[in-house]
Each structure stands twice: as structure tokens, then as C-alpha cells.
Image (spheres, grey):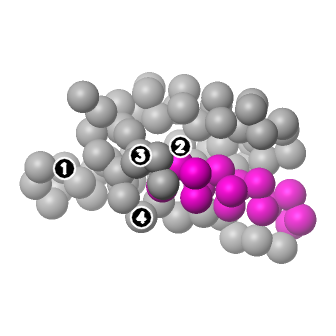
Amino acid sequence: MTDEEKQAAIEAAQRVVDEVSSYQYSAEDATIADQLDEGLAKAKVSLSDDERTRILAEIDGLKDEKSAAPQVRSATPAE
């Protein structure tokens, strides 16, 4: 995978995370996870299990309205 492909995957994943964070953060955890997974599938990118878990925890942290939106650190094009 080239650096350009990796960067494009991270940017696509970040758009999904931003959308889920802004529209779904007050939803139930299962709904947030489903929306994240659905968005990533549509964007044709994937996150590692650790990255997905971290992002879901950070989205959950938004419920206190003191946390910043999660930033995607790594993503790959879906196979």
C-alpha cells in the first residue's frame, strides 16, 4: 500500500467518524458501532480492532460534551 492510498483511507475513515460523532454520539453504543461499521463499509475502508475500539470509546466520551471528536490514526482500504 502506498502512502497516498493509506492517507486516502485515513481521510475517508475520518469523514465517517466525523459524521457518526456529530449525528450519533447520543445514541446507544450498539447503534453507534453499527453506524460506524456501515459507514466504513460504504467508504470501503477498515480499521484495526484496536483503532475501532478506541474510536468508539472516544465517541462515547463525547456524551459529556467536554471531549473532542476522535481522530483516525490509521486505516486501510477494505479488501
Residue underneath mark 4: 73
Verify whether residue 58 appears in magenta: yes
Residue 15 percent coordinates (x, y): 50, 48
CA gap, disc 1 to disc 2?
17 Å
Residue underneath mark 1: 5
Looking at the rendering, which quadrant does residue 43 occupy? top left
Residue 4 percent coordinates (x, y): 17, 56
Q: Given the image, on which type of amino acid does mark 2 rest? A: Val
- In the drawing, what numbered circle is on residue 47? 3
Q: Given the image, on which type of amino acid does mark 1 rest? A: Glu
Q: Residues within 10 Å of mark 4 (few under 14, many from 20)?
A: few
Pick the residue in front: 58 or 9.
58
Verify whether residue 62 appears in magenta: yes
Q: Earlier in the sequence, mark 1 or mark 2?
A: 1
Stretch in magenta: 51-65
Residue underneath mark 2: 16
**Quick one: SS at disc 2?**
helix
